[in-house]
Structures are given as structure tokens and as C-alpha cells.
Image (spheres, rainbow, N blue to C red):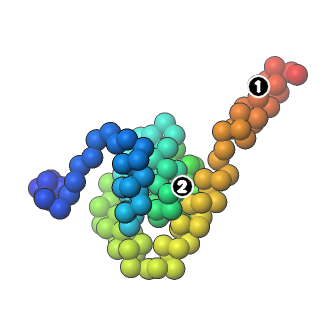
Amino acid sequence: MPRLRSRDVVHLDYLEPSQLAAVYAGAELFVFPSIYEGFGFPLLEAMAYGVPAIAANSSSLPEVGADAALYFEPNDARMLATLIEHVTTDAPMREQLIARGHERVASLRWDRAAAETLGVLRHAGGF
């Protein structure tokens, strides 16, 4: 796509944590068009930095983002464009997504995941 190769589009590879923090701090919106994700850490990462998020309605992303992100069908560029315009022009919606994002990130903690996994293993093992 020629538009994705314009001088206004910057393609980033691996970033050090401090660089990544700076990118998120300057981001108006996070768009995650991935068709398949095992979990979707970048979506949560954006939310943790307070960036409103839009993600593909595919694989684990709706489960990970829950109601803290907006979703588009991966083959529907118009739907994605509409959501981008909506989030970048509707300040109350942006604030709502940011707040929900922080809540979602807080609800997904490693210690809680470990405790729940242990509970499943104990139940499966009859303990």
C-alpha cells in the first residue's frame, strides 16, 4: 500500500522500554490490527499507558481488551477508519476508553492469574 510507505508513516521495530514509553506517551490512539494473537500484550500495554485502543475482532483480543477497547472486523477498512475518526474526535469517548483501559489492566494481574491457575490444577487433580 503506497499510503503506508509515505513519509508521514513511521515503521518501528524493537524499542527499548524507555523508547516505548515515549512512543506511548505521544500516542493519540493505539490500533492493533493483528489477525492472530496468543494473548495480546501490546493491547494491554497501550491501555496501561493510558492510550485509547482499537483492535481487530479476532483471536484473543476481544477477551483481553473486553469493554476497554473498540473492535473492527479485520477485513473492514471502512469500519476501522470510522472508529479511528470517532475516537480521535470524541473526547468523552476517549476518556471513557482510557478509564476502562486502566481498570482492565488492573484486573489482569500475574498473581491473580497464578492463583486461578493453581485452583484449576487442584480441581483437576482432585485436591
Above or below residue 34? Residue 87 is: below
Q: Circle 1: is it few (<14), some (14-19), or many (20+) Cα within 10 Å?
A: few
**Residue 111, percent across and down?**
71, 38
Name of the residue lying farthest toward the front: 18
Q: Which amino acid does label 2 sit on?
A: Ala
Residue 58 at x, y = what percent?
45, 48
Q: In this view, does 109 lie to the left or right of 38?
A: right
Q: In which quarter of the image is the C terminus?
A: top right
| Place of residue 64 in the rendered image (x, y in percent of width and height, measured from the top left) | 56, 49
| Residue for badge 1 | 121
Q: Nearer the viewer, residue 58 or 31?
A: 31
Is residue 71 visible to us here? Answer: no
| Vertical side of 109 occupied by 23: above or below | below
Q: Could you say whether the residue bearing mark 1 is in a helix, strand or loop?
A: helix
Assess disc 2: are there few (<14), some (14-19) or many (≥20) residues with their C-alpha within 10 Å of its C-alpha: some
Left or right, residue 106 beside residue 64: right
Query: Which residue is depicted at the point 56% across and 72% down?
Result: 96
Q: Could you tell me residue 55's position as x and y percent?
A: 43, 55
Residue 56 - label: none
Q: Toward which corner of the image does residue 9 lie, by quadrant? A: bottom left
Residue drawn at point x = 38 percent, y = 55 percent: 22
Name the image quarter holding residue 85: bottom left
Name the N-terminal-most of marks 2 and 1: 2
The amino acid beneath tag 1 is Leu
Q: Residue at the location (31% across, 67% down)?
A: 81
Residue positioned most to the right:
127
Which label is found at residue 48?
A: 2
Q: Is residue 111 above or below residue 9?
A: above
Disc 2, SS:
helix
What's the CA distance linking mark 2 and mark 1?
30 Å
